[in-house]
Amino acid sequence: MLDFKPGQKVLDVGCGIGGGDFYMAENFDVDVVGIDLSVNIISFALEHSIGLKCSVEFEVADCTKKEYSDNTFDVIYSRDTILNILST
């Protein structure tokens, strides 16, 4: 179980269409950045986010290559993606 605090920054690796990201942002008041390899999936997530008042951003990115500055995120979350990366 995650113990989110309002205002925390969350990175969701392999966010898919963003369902979990919207849930985290709306229910825990966190700022979420979702990344995924699929342009189509991220496009769908971006369309879904239009008009919502929660703090969610989406980006097409490869988590094995994407770099962020130290301390950019308080939490790094991934539901299934890490298993797929480790098995390749």
Image (spheres, helix red, strand yellow):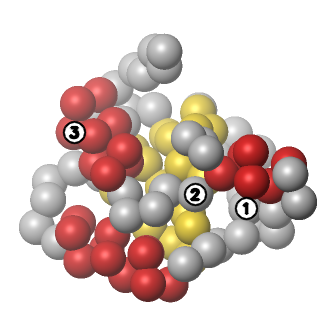
Residue in view at x 43 percent, y 75 percent: 42
Q: Which residue is mark 1?
A: 63
Disc 1, disc 3: CB below 8 Å? no
Closest to the observer: 79 or 73?
A: 79
Residue 8 has which mark?
none
Residue 57 x/y as whole percent? 40, 63
- Left or right placement of residue 63 versus residue 54 in this view: right
Closest to the camera, between mark 2 and mark 1, is 2
Q: Mark 3 or mark 2: which comes first in sequence?
A: 2
Q: What amino acid type should be assigned to the residue bearing mark 3? A: Glu
Q: Mark 2 or mark 1: which comes first in sequence?
A: 2
Disc 2, disc 1: CB below 8 Å? yes
- For marks 3 and 2, give the CA distance: 19 Å
Q: Which residue is mark 2?
A: 14
Dot 1: what SS? loop
Q: What amino acid type should be assigned to the residue bearing mark 2? A: Gly
Q: Is residue 17 above or below residue 79?
A: below
Res. 73 in view: no
Closest to the observer: 15 or 72?
A: 15
Residue 61 x/y as whole percent? 64, 73
Residue in view at x 80 percent, y 55 percent: 85
Closest to the camera, between mark 3 and mark 2, is 2
- For marks 1 and 3, give the CA distance: 24 Å
Q: Mark 1 or mark 3: which comes first in sequence?
A: 3
Which of the 4 image quadrants contains residue 4?
top left
- For marks 2 and 1, give the CA distance: 8 Å
Q: Residues within 10 Å of mark 1 (few under 14, many from 20)?
A: some
Residue 26 has which mark?
3
- Left or right placement of residue 29 versus residue 14 in this view: left
Dot 3: what SS? helix
Q: Residues within 10 Å of mark 3 (few under 14, many from 20)?
A: some
Residue 45 x/y as whole percent? 33, 69
